[in-house]
Image: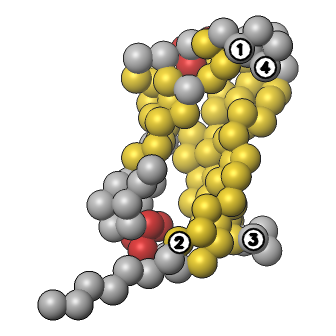
Amino acid sequence: MTYQADDNEIYVPVTDERSGQPISATDFLEAVYQISTTRGVVLFTATLLDNISVVNGEFKIRYPRDMSQAVGDQRHEMRVKDVQGNESTILQTTIKNVSTRIRI
């Protein structure tokens, strides 16, 4: 779970779809994480060279704090390529950001 305006990191573990066993993120040569509108307008792109790192075998994605301020639906997708050239989509989801009002 992330909290609007508080979190700007996402951790993505990788597992083998057949065995369910974890795969270390270090096994991949390329990784791309994109956040876009539901109409396909790209709002943010991260790569292994920029905003994606590997921590304890998982991908760690840093995105701008203002991304979590946006209200509405966003598509999140992550694609990877291994040393053999095989490409896979390892994450694909839609996140709904709802504004929060605090009354004092």
Question: Which mark is drawn over residue 57?
Answer: none
Disc 3 designates what residue? 38
Question: Which mark is drawn over residue 17?
Answer: 4
> What residue is shown at x 50% (from left), y 24% (from top)?
58
Q: Quadrant of residue 90?
A: top right
Identity of the amino acid at label 2?
A: Asn
Residue 38 seen in render: yes
Disc 1 designates what residue? 20
Circles 4 and 1: CB distance less than 8 Å? yes
Give the mark toward the camera: 2 or 3: 2
Question: Nearest the camera: 20 or 62?
Answer: 20
Identity of the amino acid at label 1?
A: Gly
- SS class, disc 3: loop
49 w.r.t. 18: above or below: below
Of the residues under marks 4 and 3, which one precedes in the sequence?
Answer: 4
Circles 3 and 1: CB distance less than 8 Å? no
Question: Nearest the camera: 92 or 42?
Answer: 92
Question: Which mark is drawn over residue 97?
Answer: 2
Count residues near mark 2 (Cα–Cα under 10 Å), then give few for <14, some for 14-19, many for 20+.
some
- SS class, disc 2: strand
Count residues near mark 3 (Cα–Cα under 10 Å), then give few for <14, some for 14-19, many for 20+.
some
Of the residues under marks 3 and 1, which one precedes in the sequence?
Answer: 1
> What residue is shown at x 71% (from left), y 14% (from top)?
20
Residue 62 seen in render: no
